[in-house]
Amino acid sequence: MFRSISLTLGQLGDPRLRSVLLMAIAASLLLIVGLAVGTGYALSALAQTGTEWLDSLLVWLGAVGTFVFALIFFPGSVQLVSGLFADTVADTVMSTHYPNAPQPRHIPLGEVIGDGLRFAVLSIGLNILALPLYFVLPGLNLIVFYGLNGYLLGREYAEMVGQRTLDRMALREFRRANQGSLFLGGVLIAALSTIPVVNLTTPVVATAFAVHEHERLRRRTVPR
């Protein structure tokens, strides 16, 4: 895994990735702003009690909640952005480091968007269900958050990268054989996606990392 991290960071200066990274940062920023505005609007709607001190308190809590909820929901939503740039990032990484790997299949944009939306709905829904645990388990809430999102992101990035070269049955076996590594990789991606500013690079960095991890694990698991 450490080699995958090193290779990912070492290629960020690649001119072929630079423009993709800038576009991904812009798209991630728009996503965060959208999440924050949407959450803020929903919470501010509650500050209509007619009692001045209570409305002021709710506005203050809403501002804090907007920031917190945007961080919580971003890991799941970022997969939408990652899917849009996945092929370009993966092809760049593969051509540089794994030129002899199996040729990937073309994944239609509709399938990419559909998978991203499915994952975003699942991730946001599960995080909403887990919100009580995040607020009532101080100290343990981070374990719950990174455990849940690490599992989801590890599986989703494994599928996003794996479906380029593996059929459905082989991909299922691949995930089953590498559950621990995929989970740890997902936790790392979840951690990256909650660091302000740095998380804007998640679509590119996480995809490149997932490609390296897939190749490392595939060569260990799947017969060539």
Image (cartoon, rainbow, N blue to C red):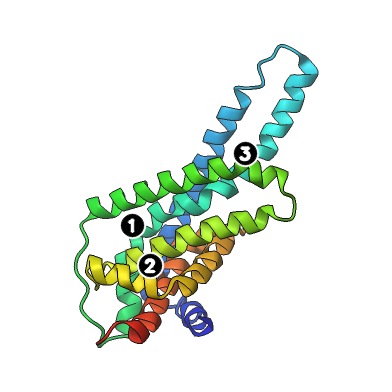
| Percent x, y of residue 205 | 47, 69
Reading the image, the residue beneath label 3 is 66
Please, what secondary structure does the residue beneath circle 3 have? helix
The residue at the point 52 percent across, 56 percent down is: 149
* Lower sequence index among marks 2 and 1: 1
Residue 218, quarter of the rendered image: bottom left
Give the residue at x 39% y 81%: 217
Does residue 67 appear anywhere in the picture? no
* Dot placed on the residue nearer the N-terminal end, 3 or 1: 3
Residue 51 is left or right of residue 212, and the answer is right
Dots 3, 2 in contact, CB < 8 A: no
Looking at the figure, which quarter contains the C terminus? bottom left
Q: Mark 1 points at which residue?
A: 84
Q: Residue 158 carries which label?
A: 2
Pointer 1: residues within 10 angstroms few (<14), some, or many (20+)? some
Q: Where is residue 152 in the image (x, y as percent from the top left)?
A: 46, 58
Seen at 51% across and 54% down, the residue is 75
Residue at the extreme top? 50
- Nearer-the-camera pick, 21 or 140: 140
Amino acid type indicated by mark 1: Leu
For the residue pair 191 and 159, the one nearer the viewer reads as: 159
**Percent from the top left, x then y, of residue 97?**
35, 86
